[in-house]
Image (tube, rainbow, N blue to C red):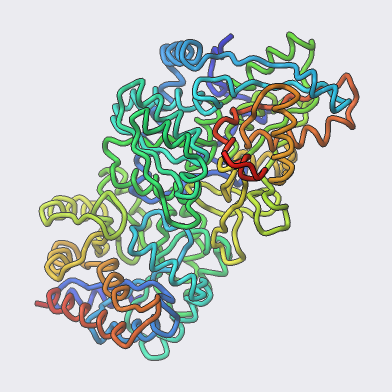
Amino acid sequence: MTNTSSPLSSPLVNSLRSGPDDRGRFGIFGGRFVAETLMPLLLELDEAYRATQADPEFRKELDYYLKDYVGRPSPLWFAQHLTEELGGAKVYFKREELNHTGSHKLNNVMGQILVARRMGKTRIVAETGAGQHGVATATVCALFGLKCTIYMGATDVERQKPNVFRMHLLGAEVKPVTAGAGTLKDAMNEAMRDWVANVSDTYFLVGTVAGPHPYPEMVRDFQSVIGVEVKEQITQAEGRLPDVIVAAIGGGSNAMGIFHPFLDDASVRLIGVEAAGHGLDSGKTAASISRGRPGVLHGNRTYLLQDKHGQIEEAHSISAGLDYPGIGPEHSWLNDIGRAEYVGVTDEEALEAFQVCTRSEGIIPALECAHGLAHVMKIAPAMAKDQIIVLNVSGRGDKDIFTVAHHLGVKL
Amino acid sequence: MSRIQTRFAALKKEGRGALIPYLQACDPDYDTSLELLRAMPAAGADLIEIGVPFSDPSADGPTIQAAALRGLKAGATLGRVLEMVRAFRETDNETPIVLMGYLNPIDSYGPAEFCFDAAQAGVDGIIVVDMPTEEADLLDAHAREAGLDIISLVAPTTSNSRLFHVLRDASGFVYYVSITGITGTNSASAADLEKALPRIREATSLPVAIGFGISTPEQARTASRIGDAAVVASALIKTMAGTLEDGRATERTVPSVLKQLEGLAAAVRA
């Protein structure tokens, strides 16, 4: 099963899937807020991306790598034990953690690296939070023999050591960033600084559905393979579409990937789960939509955690992949028009869900998607037994066992 | 005529380019940066650029990043920066003041209110690093109404055809980011500048200021001759940072920066 045409290869009328507009906007969100030095590069990237969309050879090439290298399609698993335990709706897992490198990140990276190659770029820079995007990027750079530099917050380097070592093994240079709190936001700043200084040979491989246009659109398109597969798989398994789709959100790429093909299916509730950290009102949260307001950062207008003077605040989450004060602009738009709902789950709730999933299904989820699962555990019991929830299990949790052990007071 | 036009016209008569020093507002504290700002014209500043501290200055190198953090720690807000300009205007009504910063604090303040308040305070122009021409409609009309110049940035990556697009409605002066990179890192050579400037002048008759990577008197002199002005930022901040003790100003802070500024001015005027 492969995605045979890009979701935007033909114009969509009266559809929620037609965005962004030609200024890269979803409603008031998105845009291209970058320094002039980068602006010509974004225009060049936009042109290159449009060319790949029109090229059947590109799609063929991408499908080949998605199938034989990434390992797609990923299964849709009926989580029977968890369903019984919760006593309500049937819970399905979209098994993105089974992709090569252990998360959904490779879907996007594989697409973008093929674009970068067509543009003749020889060096790749990327930002990473939990390290999943960094590992995926380092992986394709190894595959295609490209130079690779990954920027990672120093705090994240510390809490995600296995992934740092993986990137080293794959031949990437990992640069710890000590500015700010040393997390994803700071890594993003530093990656942009690198890009602006090395524009001629370097491609900036953004890992989520954020940043300046066309990144949010392009990353979404490459991740939409998740939702396209779910649609086919759930129809085969249940003969109908799900009632609810749940996905965890940092920047929001796994959520956008599973949501987007369902945007026009009004019967399907879409729920994005933000990291509430110590609690939505604790001041230590990463819930940009629930506790932020619109502003401009990292090339796009979107919901941001910021003070009243427009200074960006540090996010907090136990999960390095969700520890970001912004969110993809299309999510901000989906929130404002009411098509998707955004809720918060705390560190504690995610830790609990992490353990439940591991014991009941034998699947160790990434802490990111444990947030999604925690919300499923809240809503499933109150739903009817013939209702269906699909959770995007966007990554595996091997990288998180040290963090979890630490929080459980276990010394490894 | 605006203060910016008047100043560039006067310098043209003098037959020399302008020196534009930069300071970060509230770095290391409000009083010190105001004292420095007030003393800059006498030390040779023809125009002055004031950096508005932002938490995520993604186009700036380590020197200005650190200055922004010090400024924020000292309580810098956009309102406080305007207060500083008002205080400066009490004693100087000629030297043009240009604010340089990122969009989000302005967006948060409110684009229309900001343009009005800034012009009232005595600001002449604004440079918004992360607002390319494609997004400038956010501020354009408000700035025009308030009589503020939005200073357009152009870069080595800006193609000839794009130069015309970017500079079509430009006012005040044009800021040429002379390297592809962040502030205070590499420097463009005189040969690079000699090649770039005719390209820009094809597209505009406005004065062209050259910035990013200008640190020595020699470089300032070269840039002010090939262009119409040289912007010196990180080099002055580095000097200031070197005089701080535990992040606080010392009695050497203001004199050290002014002394360096005098050296730069002498070279530009030689």
The number of discs equals 0
Q: Nearer the viewer, residue B145 or A104?
A: A104
Specify the farthest residue to the front. A411
**As displayed, is residue A62 above or below residue B110?**
above
Q: Nearer the viewer, residue A35 or A252?
A: A252
Residue drawn at point x = 27 percent, y = 43 percent: B159
Q: Nearer the viewer, residue B42 or B11?
A: B42
Whether residue A185 is visible to the viewer of this picture, yes or no, is no
- Tell me residue B133's x, y (percent): 41, 51
Residue drawn at point x = 25 percent, y = 81 percent: B256
Whether residue A151 is visible to the viewer of this picture, yes or no, is yes
- Tell me residue A228's x, y (percent): 63, 18
Residue drawn at point x = 40 percent, y = 80 percent: B248
- Tell me residue B99's x, y (percent): 40, 69
Is B86 on the left-hand or right-hand side of B11? right
Specify the farthest residue to the bottom. B91
**As displayed, is residue A179 above or below residue A350?**
below
Residue drawn at point x = 44 percent, y = 47 percent: A187
- Tell me residue A185's x, y (percent): 50, 49
**As displayed, is residue B260 above or below residue A297?**
below
Is B28 on the left-hand or right-hand side of B184? right
**Quarter occupied by the C terminus of chain A:** top right
When asked about the image quadrant of residue A112, the answer is top left
**Quarter occupied by the N terminus of chain A:** top right
When asked about the image quadrant of residue B268, the answer is bottom left
Q: Nearer the viewer, residue B67 or A178?
A: A178
